[in-house]
Image (spheres, rainbow, N blue to C red):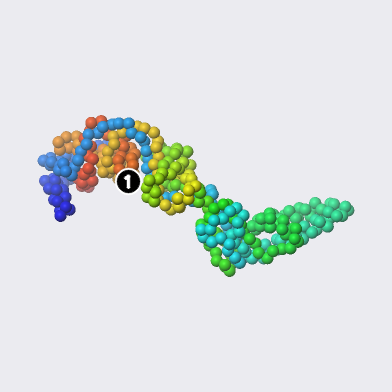
Amino acid sequence: MSLGIVVGRVTNVNRNVKIEASDKALKVESTGVLELKLPGVKLNPEIYVFQTAEKSASTCQYQNTRTLAFNAEKSKVLSARAPGRVERIYAFDGAQVEIGSPIVELYSPEFLSAQQEYLLSSKTAQVLESSKTMSDLLGDARITQQAAANRMRNLGASDGDIKSIESTGKTTSNLIMRSPLKGVVVKRNVEPGSAVNAGDVITTLADPKHLWFLGNVFEQDFRMIKQGQKMILTLEAYPDKEFVAYANYIAPMIDPQTRALLIRADVENMDDLLRPDMYASGLLTTGTADAVVVPQSAIMRVRENRYAIIKVGPETYRRVPVKGYDLNGKSFAITEGVEQGWQILAEGSVLLNDRFAKQED
């Protein structure tokens, strides 16, 4: 029933207007301003609400809603450095790990060969050390020993593994791959018994204490954002809590499809409340400016441009391009395009904009 009343009102407002190209009711200016005359039409004040533009000092803020992600600078991919077979998995998805914690155990013939080479070169160096007549060969033996040790490191062995082989004089059948950071296992790509080739990803590790907020900034707004600026994040999961982030990256080029730039901010997650892929709303304060604050319903967005409708006469309306920024998701601060004292359409702009669109066609 309520829907019928609203539809009836809208129909009643619009019924006396004849939309024809020959009416020449629409005037297009070179600045992009459209002027529409509706002779004999009185807009319903319950649907079309105007307010007087009043400029006041307003905090310049930019709001952006996007997702959280792991900090890639504090994440690592553990990959096989030689062909082999997975014998055992120590840390499964979600496991907490420390630096040096075992992740997987691999059987690798190449690693076994590297151990034997290191063990042989170590024994040769020990023999030459006891012989004063072969000192010239000792340097070459040490070089060979160091090269064998480096080969083992390249395959994933730790310094502890190398010292253990030298002290015991025995090789180990399997290579234990260890965590290079303190964090969690984000994703595991292998199962026990599976074969891997050199370069295959075994697992992905990340530090959940350090996250990124990834957002988009439209090209007309990115001038307001600088590296190092403080950003306040709010999430639906914690409506009464605020999180602090600092912008650390602004993309050097615009995405041709979205006409936006990627921004990135560092987020500390010491309380473990945040998770990657959570939606977060980032509010960035960039200063103060004289602005006309209107409801979001007063602003029409056409691609990357924003417009508002003003009343310039009893039957004349103008659609003007405006610039500004969003405020708390409910209001919009107009910094350019509207002057003090103008009558700006606060509600019903979508309906009246349809008139402009029909006259444009």
- Please determine whether, in this image, residue 263 is positioned above or below residue 94: above
Q: Which residue is rendered at x = 16% and y = 48% of the image?
A: 10
Amino acid at circle 1: Arg
Q: Residue at x 81, y 56 (%)?
A: 126
Location of residue 217 with respect to 180 vertically, above or below: above
Question: How far from the left and from the top, in percent, is residue 277?
Answer: 43, 53
Q: In the rendered picture of this protein, how many numbered marks are placed on residues?
A: 1
**For the view shown, which residue lies furthest in the right direction?**
133
Q: Residue drawn at (55%, 59%), measured in percent from left and top?
A: 203
Residue shown at 77% from the left, 53% from the top? 142
Answer whether residue 65 is visible to the viewer in this image: no
Nearer to me, 6 or 97: 97
> Is 72 left or right of 52, judged from the image as shown?
right
Left or right position of 13 against 206? left
Quarter holding the N terminus is bottom left
Q: Secondary structure at mark 1?
A: loop
Residue 4 screen position, x and y as percent: 15, 53
Q: Is residue 159 visible?
A: yes
In the displayed structure, does residue 322 sit left or right of residue 224?
A: left
For mark 1, what is the residue? 303
Q: Quadrant of residue 339?
A: top left
Q: Nearer the viewer, residue 215 or 174?
A: 174
**Residue 342, image x, y percentages:** 23, 33
Q: Residues within 10 Å of mark 1 (few under 14, many from 20)?
A: few
Left or right of residue 262, residue 320 in this image: left
Image coords of residue 106 (percent x, y):
62, 64
